[in-house]
Amino acid sequence: MNAAASATDRALIEGDIEQYLRTHENKSLLRFITCGSVDDGKSTLIGHLLYKAKALLDDQLSTLAADSRRIGTQGDELDFALLVDGLSAEREQGITIDVAYRFFSTDKRKFIVADTPGHEQYTRNMVTGASTADLAIILIDARKGMLTQTRRHSYLTSLVGIRHVVLAVNKLDLVGYSQQKFAEIEREYRAFIARLGGSIRQVTCIPLSALRGDNIVASSANTPWYRGPSLLDFLESVQIASDSTSAPLRMPVQWVNRPNLDFRGFSGRLLGGSVKPGDTVRVLPSGKISSVERIVDFDGDKAEAVNGESVTLVLADEIDISRGDVICAAQEPAGVADQFETTVVWFDETPMLPGRAYLVKLGASTLGGKLSKPKYAVDVNTLDHVAAATLDLNEVGVCTLTLDRAVPFDAYADNRDMGSFIVIDRLTNRTLAAGTLHFALRRSQNIHWQALEVDKAARARLNGHRPCVLWFTGLSGSGKSTIANLVERKLHTFGVRTYLLDGDNVRHGLNKDLGFTAADRVENIRRIGEVAKLMVDAGLVVLTAFISPFQSERKLARDMLPDGEFVEIFVDAPLAIVERRDPKGLYKKARRGELKNFTGIDSPYEAPASPELHIDAEKLDADVAAERIIAYLHAHDLLTHA
Amino acid sequence: MHSLTSLQRLEAESIDILREAVAESERPVMLYSIGKDSQVMLHLARKAFFPSRPPFPLLHVDTTWKFRDMYAMRERAARESGMDLIVHKNPEAEALGINPFTHGSAKHTDMWKTQGLKQALDLHRFDLAFGGARRDEEKSRAKERVFSFRSAQHQWDPKNQRPELWRLYNTRKNPGESIRVFPLSNWTELDIWQYIHRESIPIVPLYLAAERPVVERDGVLIMVDDERFPLRLGEIPKHKSVRFRTLGCYPLSGAIESDANTLPAIIREMLLATTTERQGRLIDHDSSASMEKKKAEGYF
């Protein structure tokens, strides 16, 4: 569809076609999306833009005229929406159901338009269209003003990093071309964008009637009060912040080019920066350094390649490079990490399952990964952060992404292509979600080490779980140590860092100066509490298995730690039972008077009033008890870092 | 430091798509129809993998009714690229002698092209096929993905397409399923011509005007390319200066009268034209939404 029929173009085409071709070839390209609610008139706007830009040819116009009479909604007039609503399913429903791409050019620019649907269940299509756009046109029906969808579209626009927004206040003919109405909407929208923050730097509001053609290609006599550009004027002249050629070099290796044993090239597209033979490069994730020997091209070697070009590089050194590695500027390499804070937009009807093994594609790497329970979800209508256990279709949330191995990356805000990913279902192969990387969480693996306060939270992030004390209490022989040992073994297999404090490793060292008097028992527990507190600060899950008979000392230990980090586990077995078991023969000794101050015999045991967990050791098997404790930890998010 | 022109951008994007598809598939193939879009796609493939040969064969789904000039170009393309050329002719259509004159264009296209293509893909177990379709050609193409997923029955479900974001293409599929990949998705007809001009890509001479024997039927000029053309009683081919905007089976391709015999001249003619290129292609007129229907059935 290329009728370049503007008068100046036509003259040039007829006069000097070669000159025209050179001009056309040097035109810049603007990619934009249009979004609006179902009835805002998006398709009509695009249809009208194509019509007015003279991008429609005779056969298309005659088809349109025939279709307009047959199924149009505009009486005898052309129904421009029919031009764009391509699929027959859509014609029946009278709505747009997918992203459609349109192409047109004017004297000044070439355009690719992504027409994206407005109704809620198709948010994924809007994000899709926006992901490659430089600018967004957001439509508002002047009669209705800002709607929920307007906020959602603006939020998603900013989420994918678009800087320029045109607010097209449409159907102005239906409000009598009211300046006041337009001004109200503009004011409300600008206030909203100011609150939104994010990527949007420039908002241009234009009063329109897509149906009547007001302010689409020329200023309309119906809006004498509007002094700004027409929509097409604006699209032709808007300056899009120059691409990232000045950014540092990034080239993910897509394909290793080995036609024979003497040639080894690395093919890929520059996603940032530029490269010349002789440049020093660093290959990630290995971090190996080499220099560029040649930029190989079909038409002979090149002296330079810039952002956006697809090239094949030959390096000076033989280093092992495979698909997914990234060739970077040596002085400004990308980060390398396997855990990130991310924003995720969920696309699928099956909700996100935190912890499930998904496939993640990022650059030229596809690898295993999992998402955490959302730190929060974003209500795209109010922009409030809300608590969420998962993400449903079209929901947006902030989650931790953990990959099976470390990969090179940049933050999305710095480089869209190096900081974006999709989530794929291993079984159905559906694209479930898309996401953007904010920053790496395991900074120890980031090449740019940033000064960071190493505190309990940082250690928890590194460990991948929160620290706490599992304080087992109960009579001698109740099974505390047996259960604690089982729990520790299970936690260890989950990759949780643990330490078990018990009589064996405390009584014989730290506390060997203490006996069994009431005072010594108090001091014993105090010291254990202090050691446990240090270990919790170090990020460990600490298990203590001591009788710890007194309520007040247990409270002392509990009070040393923040809420939620002290888990008291009462291993409850009646004296009669433990005395019968008597695995170490201690009860017999105590009964014989050979052991003084033995708990339960001649020293009291104060049972906990409200322990976090109460284990009935008389009935429960030790393994079942251990599973109950693990389940408790999961339920209270102690085994995740968030 | 310079930034890329729109044509350089398109070239880079297409090469990126070609490489990504090859890196992530087991048995790729390039559908080669000998037209101008195929010539551009083949040229891009040679650039993408240079100095290697493109690591896949060319597949021509032949109907036996192409122009003789097209068959000559097909052999030349295979020779110059050094790539393997697979020619598939639907044996059933061959046995039945399916042709556009006796069986009509719809049946002819279905048997030779749609069924023929499915047979060839199944026969060689190709899991990924490049096609030269552009989004600007036709309304239902405008919504097609670059990586377009097909069921084991080669069916396209427009309501169940995978979202494509940034330049991250989901190429995963189960055994038996396949992907059609369209590296020229974002090119327009003008971009194609301009690129052919800039890169001196060889094209079938039928795109350029020359004296050719034609008959006029239902207002369309059809070239009498070989002796199989059944002339009606009293019908005598006339020599006219004609050229073709799109090429397919010669009995189904309408010629336009033209004197444009150089690339710039045909670009000029195209720019000043008032109809789309598909108008010369007879199969699109069979029914409204015919392309979408054919695609759902497995046509490229």
Image (cartoon, coloured by chain):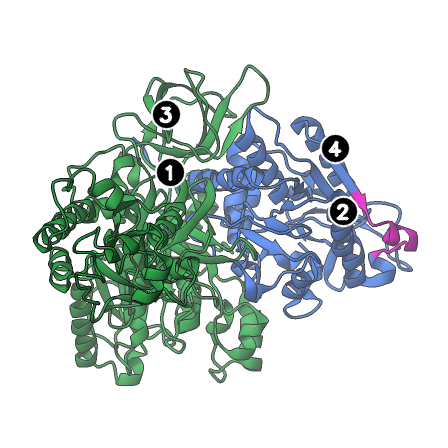
Answer whether labels 1 and 4 touch (C-beta < 8 Å).
Answer: no
CA distance separating discs 2 and 1: 41 Å
- Amino acid type indicated by mark 2: Ala
Pointer 3: residues within 10 angstroms few (<14), some, or many (20+)?
Answer: few
**Disc 2 secondary structure class:** helix
Q: Residue A462 falls in which quadrant of the image? A: top left
Q: Quadrant of the C terminus of chain B?
A: bottom right
Image height of B212 relative to A204, above or below: above
Residue A398, image x and y in percent?
Answer: 30, 58
Which chain is indicated by disc 2? B
Q: Which mark is residue A206?
A: none
Residue A355, image x and y in percent?
Answer: 41, 56
Q: Residue A200 falls in which quadrant of the image? A: bottom left
**Disc 4 secondary structure class:** helix
Which chain is indicated by disc 3? A
Which chain is indicated by disc 4? B
Residue to which mark 2 is pinned: B120
**Of circles 2 and 1, which is in front?**
1
Residue A129, image x and y in percent?
Answer: 41, 58
CA distance separating discs 3 and 4: 36 Å
Pointer 2: residues within 10 angstroms few (<14), some, or many (20+)?
Answer: some
- Amino acid type indicated by mark 1: Ala
**Of circles 3 and 2, which is in front?**
2
CA distance separating discs 3 and 2: 42 Å
**Disc 3 secondary structure class:** loop
Q: Nearer the viewer, residue B77 or A633?
A: A633
Is A570 positioned to the left or the right of B245 in the image? left
Question: Residue at 28% of width from left, 60% of height from top?
Answer: A375
Residue to which mark 4 is pinned: B75
